[in-house]
Amino acid sequence: MGEKKEQKIIVFTTLSPSDKGLILSGVKIASIFKKELCLAYRMHKKEVKNHRAYKQRLIDYTVPLKKEIPDLKTSVLLLQEPLRSLPEILADDYEAILLIADSSRFKSYSKAVTESPVPFLFINTQAPLSPFREIVLPVDLRKENSDTALWCSWFGRFNQSNIIAVAANEKRKESQGQVARNIMLTKKLFRKFDISHKIFKGNKTSLQNSFEAMDFALTSNTDLLVLLGSSVITPLDWLVGLPERKIIRNAGNLPVLLVNPRRDNYILCD
């Protein structure tokens, strides 16, 4: 039998000064969940000739980390595959469970996000390091809300985070029932692990629930917004931009964990 691979938190570096914020967030997340930190860089075709130099730069990033945090497992990875197919490759071949990227580059990652079986954590690289303690979770009528609730529960269990759920306010009876079911399941999950949480009924329907949650998160000075991505993506969405792109663009210093509802997601192993 082959050696069991470590689950990894993957940081998409850019080999620029902005990497510092991404790597610090990666260190924080890897430490919370006790996972390996992997610093990755995707090379364009014209960059392949610099393969050795780029790998050395990634290794140089890990040297001070090993000195400061000896228990933190680290690795480096150079990639050439198309960005869109990278999340699945990283999940299948490298045991990636979370991908960390620069929020200012969301547009270039957007198609990768919609194909990804693992969440993306988008970080403003100029913002102070988040403690990920106060988390806002929008809850709408989609059954895939269980995926975002599960990630919140892991932060609650391993980081003692407090979760604030903002429930969509639907007008139709059937939709109200679907939101109520999602809230009931979310409460049940959080109570099972004794996770601190509050539930608020929002003013907006499921269509605007994520925007309302973002506004609440920004005015409440919380540390993380956990967001379920778009379930249906139309050509118009690609033209004018996905709702999650608008949220990430307007999130300021707030990190956004984006879960793709259109894929069976890989889960964190205790």
Image: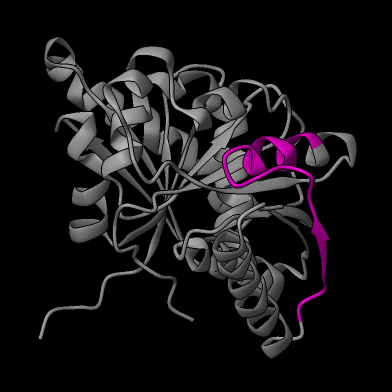
| Residue that lies at the very extreme toward the bottom in this rendered image | 192
Residue drawn at x 78%, y 34% as measured from the top left: 215
Q: Is residue 79 above or below residue 240?
A: below
Give the quarter of the image for residue 178: bottom right
Measured from the top left, where is residue 183 in percent x and y? 66, 71
Measured from the top left, where is residue 75 in percent x and y? 36, 51
Identify the image's colour scheme: rainbow, by chain, secondary structure or one colour: one colour
Q: Which residues are magenta?
A: 195-215
User: Within the magenta stretch, is there residue 59?
Assistant: no
Measured from the top left, where is residue 152 in percent x and y? 63, 64
Q: Quadrant of the N terminus?
A: bottom left
Q: Is residue 235 above or below residue 138?
A: above
Horizontal side of 251 relative to 27 (left or right) equals right
Residue drawn at x 82%, y 45% as measured from the top left: 222
Give the quarter of the image for residue 114: top left
Horizontal side of 203 relative to 37 (left or right) equals right
Q: Is residue 207 visible?
A: yes
Residue drawn at x 56%, y 23% as measured from the top left: 246
Foreground residue, 114 or 10? Answer: 114
Horizontal side of 202 relative to 83 (left or right) equals right
Horizontal side of 248 relative to 78 (left or right) equals right
Residue drawn at x 67%, y 52% as measured from the top left: 171
Foreground residue, 187 or 74? Answer: 187
Measured from the top left, where is residue 47 in percent x and y? 18, 14
Foreground residue, 187 or 127? Answer: 187
